[in-house]
Image (cartoon, rainbow, N blue to C red):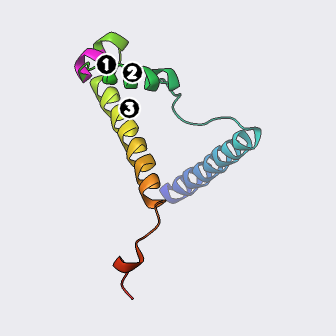
């Protein structure tokens, strides 16, 4: 008796999974954005960079913009990483000194 009930429950679960996957596929096809909504936008990133350049601490920026200190830290590290990548791209663009290249 319990085997039959277990088999029916397993079958029902498989149907649910199939419907969910189908729904997600249809939503992606329509261009719907899935997942948690973005709460911080480009304005926040620019404002954090501006306030950092003005010399404010992470805590002061978080208090002023009413966001968490972790968000400020994350946005600051992204900005720092972007600057580093831009600088390294400029450095990499310089021609190599042929005398320093191992042959």
Few, some or many C-alpha atoms within 10 Å of disc 2 (few <14, some 14-19, many ≥20)? few
Q: Nearer the viewer, residue 101 or 27?
A: 101
Q: Which mark is residue 25?
A: none
Q: CA distance from mark 2 to mark 1?
A: 6 Å
Question: Do tag 2 and tag 1 residues touch (Cβ < 8 Å)?
Answer: yes
Q: Going by the image, does 79 lie left or right of 4?
A: left
Q: Is residue 62 left or right of residue 42?
A: left
Q: CA distance from mark 2 to mark 3?
A: 12 Å
Q: Residues within 10 Å of mark 3 (few under 14, many from 20)?
A: some
Residue pictured at 38% horizontal, 23% vertical: 48
> On the image, numbered disc 2 is attached to which residue?
50
State the residue position of label 1: 54
For the residues carrying marks 2 and 3, which lies nearer the camera in this image?
2
Q: How many marks?
A: 3
Verify whether residue 15 appears in magenta: no
Magenta stretch, main secondary structure class = helix
Q: 55 left or right of 3?
A: left
Q: Secondary structure at mark 2?
A: helix
Percent x, y for residue 15?
65, 50
Q: CA distance from mark 1 to mark 3?
A: 16 Å
* Quadrant of residue 34 within the rendered picture: top right
Q: In what quadrant of the picture does the C terminus appear?
A: bottom left
Q: The magenta stretch spans which residues?
A: 58-62
Viewer-side label of 1, 3:
1
Res. 65 image quadrant = top left
Please name the residue shown 41% across and 56% down the image.
91
Residue on which the image places disc 3: 75
């Amino acid at each position: 008796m319990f085997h039959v009930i277990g088999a029916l429950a397993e079958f029902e679960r498989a149907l649910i999974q199939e419907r969910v996957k189908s729904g997600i596929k249809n939503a992606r096809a329509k261009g719907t954005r899935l997942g948690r909504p973005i709460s911080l936008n480009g304005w926040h990133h620019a404002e954090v960079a501006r306030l950092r350049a003005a010399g404010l601490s992470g805590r002061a920026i978080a208090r002023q913009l009413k966001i968490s200190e972790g968000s400020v830290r994350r946005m600051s590290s992204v900005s720092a990483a972007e600057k580093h990548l831009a600088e390294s791209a400029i450095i990499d663009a310089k021609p190599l000194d042929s005398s320093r290249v191992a042959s």
